[in-house]
Image (spheres, helix red, strand yellow):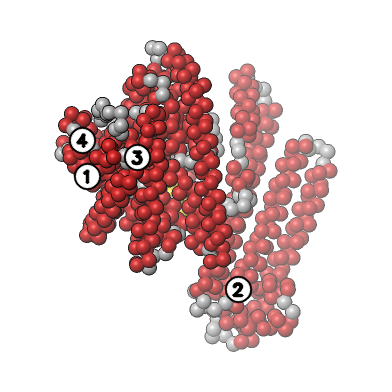
Amino acid sequence: MKVLDESLLWVLLPFFHLIASAAEHEEVAKHAIKLHRGKGATATQRKQWVLDSCRRLTGLLRQKNVVLNKLKSAIRAVEKDATLSGEEKLFQVHTFEIFQKELNESENSVFQAIHGLQRALQGDYRDVVNMKESSKQRLEALREAAIKEETEYVELLAAEKHQVEALKNMQHQNKSLSMLDEILEDVRKAADRLEEEIEEHAFDDNKSVKGVNFEAVLRVEEEEASSKQNITKREVEDGLGLSMLIDSQNNQYILTKPRDSTIPRADHHFIKDIVTIGMLSLPCGWLCTTIGLPTMFGYIICGVLLGPSGLNSIKSIVQVETLGEFGVFFTLFLVGLEFSPEKLRKVWRISLQGPCYMTLLMIAFGLWWGHLLRIRPTQSVFISTCLSLSSTPLVSRFLMGSARGDKEAGDIDYSTVLLGMLVMQDVQLGLFIAVMPTLIQAGASTSSSVIMEALRILFLIGQTLFSLAAIFLLCLIIKTYLIGPYYRKLHVESKGNKEILILGVSAFIFLMLTVTELLDVSMELGCFLAGALVSSQGHMVTEEIMASIEPIRDFLAIIFFTSIGLHVFPTFVIYELTVLVFLTLSVVVMKFVLAVLVLSLILPRSSQYIKWIVSAGLAQVSEFSFVLGSRARRAGIISREVYLLILSVTTLSLLLAPVLWKAAITKCVPRPERRSSL
């Protein structure tokens, strides 16, 4: 601590000597003497020590000014030297400027430290907020200094490279080159030009952009590289660049785009993660099939075993989750293939009214319970909306391949109603994600601005409805004029080569999800609409495309459900098992009862019997609550404890869903159709 006090005093000295008056100098010197480690010395000796140190540092600053003048003279001499080429002049002048910058930055660091110490002396050590602000300002100064030093280091590396190149050119000029050496020299120059053309300078281009923060990170090299004994530090820096960066918040980052794009690279962590998931998902899925559970729960168990709560062997969690999203896309596309537009027309009123009524009732119950438990209205609305959503991929797996049975003219197929309501919930999901920023602001706003926030929410709702109208108009145009010729062209080109058919269908899926994303509606809706548009071409088309896409969907669905398991924490469930079981049963029973009540009001009298099956399919919580919960936690809408409760209740409700579905199918579906459904 004494050494630190002396260091702080040393940087304080020029401030005394250069800008303080005699009276102010005497006053500030008294504070500095208290910091001096020589507490046994007399006051006169300590004051003399301060003055002597001030004189020595002042001499250094004067010497720095002399050096700067000499550098300026040297720059003028280089510019007037006629024997140097223009490129060599620029190089030498730039080298001098780098040294000038080093001197100026060193002086600036001294005065920044002075101001920091002055703030600390003027502050109150009992004021934590003031000390935190001072620490933040010092941290920002250090970050800026680190960036400047990094820039200077890069410039020095470039200067060193230039010197090496100049030395090589002199050696080549002094000796005759063979034809092979001349060819290699030309290739070297061309390679240098190529690197200069493709290099983006992303660091320099973005460091001054508004909103960019400088962070301190740790660089962890590859395990394979660190295990090699004969590797040098420079070889590590010039390697593949696949080291991991860890910031102060324990977030881990991997390389997304290298500086040198001429060398192919692969993320070996991600490859190992996918291989591990593929190997472990087989026995887990096999076990669930043996005991009569859907295979998806085996994949979730696989994620639990490999995730942070298990072996913690998955390194690229974000990349695995991103790949798993494609499983959702292809699953919903196949759902759309089986979803006939003619059936959609028959149940569009039910599909529109049912989810809206259920969401409103859930929000009403949530606000009521929130008022009793003294929970903020913003948090109550979020939790209720989050729990009102049901899992489309899960129900799609239940319905996949199930027989529809021959219905009479007045009957409605339960699968059509169920899928229609789930699609509308996906629309609500996109709407809720769009409204969430305004919901955050409304929660933090004063009463005088609540009206404005409500108007903003209504504007967003109107914007979303307009986007939906535009999407369905586009679907009508595609169905009428484009999808038929497009498929016929794919069918002709893909004879004997299924790659064209798979690629063409995948491109159409990605086009539709891009359109819905651009219109601020969920991408999942675009995938479903893509399947519905293709299904309009007939049963034969549907069967051909389904046979080609199903294997891709199955593999990506494994990744998706495994990624869900990565966020399941068995230890937390065990610790709070009683509370979680009670909450899960309450949510499942409430959703089932509300669905039965709503369907009893909107279903035709002849189709009332399907309300039990549809309600059983809706009586669980969507896996998208993970996404919504993570966003709400980052935004401060919900706490960490509420976030973990949402994750656990969602997982338990998904585990309970097959039991409820099987019971409803057994009770309400005729026997021939029941065997196919199960």
Q: Which residue is mark 3?
A: 392
The answer to which of marks 3 and 4 sits earlier in the sequence is: 3
Q: Residue at x 47, y 19 (%)?
A: 484
Q: Is residue 507 left or right of residue 573?
A: right
Q: Residues within 10 Å of mark 1 (few under 14, many from 20)?
A: some
The answer to which of marks 1 and 3 sits earlier in the sequence is: 3
Which numbered disc, 3 or 4, marks the residue closer to the eye? Answer: 4
Q: Nearer the viewer, residue 485 or 145?
A: 485
Q: Which residue is mark 1?
A: 660
Q: CA distance from mark 1 to mark 2?
A: 65 Å
Q: CA distance from mark 3 to mark 4?
A: 21 Å
- Res. 119 mark: 2
Q: Give residue 90's position: percent from left, percent from top.
A: 74, 41
Asked if residue 574 is positioned above or below residue 660 in the image, the reply reads below
Q: CA distance from mark 2 to mark 3?
A: 58 Å
Q: Which residue is mark 4?
A: 669
The answer to which of marks 1 and 4 sits earlier in the sequence is: 1
